[in-house]
Image (spheres, grey):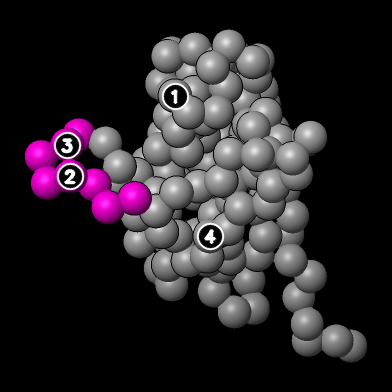
Amino acid sequence: MSTLRNPVLRTWETSLTEHSTSVRTARRLVRDQLTSWGWGGDPVDDLVLIASELVTNAVVHACRSHGEIRLYLQEFDGDCRLEVWDPRGDLALRDPRPRRFSEGGRGIELVRRLAFDFGVIGHRDAGKRVWVRILLGPSDNVPSPGS
């Protein structure tokens, strides 16, 4: 008998309209979905904050009245991947140096610091996906061996 455990895989996705209320909606939907999967604590808070930052970027910079934003969650055994799709595959993520007193320009750096892994998949004619991966902490909802 194999001792390898198959990872549990759950997926969820939704579409949001390009609107200022989409950020609040994304935070609520991501929190609700992760909670329904049994996630709690810092990983949920981190993913909610990351979703907020990425959806804000999509609404402000990528959509500009061009439609929708899509959110994807994929849960594997011990981690979760969040993707935010927007219609602008030609618009790369910039790594600007924010001005000292400016309010913007820090979101992607925050995302990079919170995520275990981070990346962008862009297709000029098919939009782009900004993705992050968060790990469950050792005490966060991880079944004990043999359970």
Spot the residue most to the right.
1
Circle 4 packing at 10 Å, graded few (<14), some (14-19), many (20+), is some
Q: Which corner quadrant of the image does residue 50 belong to?
A: top left
Q: Which mark is residue 99?
A: 2
Q: Which residues are magenta?
A: 96-103
Alpha carbons under labels 3 and 1: distance apart: 16 Å
Three-letter residue code for mark 3: Ser
Residue carrying label 3: 102
Query: Which sits in the foreground, 142 or 114?
Result: 114
Place of residue 141 in the rendered image (x, y in percent of width and height, measured from the top left) = 49, 60
**Mark 4 highlights which residue?**
118
The overriding secondary structure of the stretch rendered in magenta is loop
Res 129 → quadrant: top right
Camera-side residue: 58 or 70? 58
Query: Could you tell me which quadrant the C terminus lies in?
Result: bottom right
Farthest left residue in view: 101
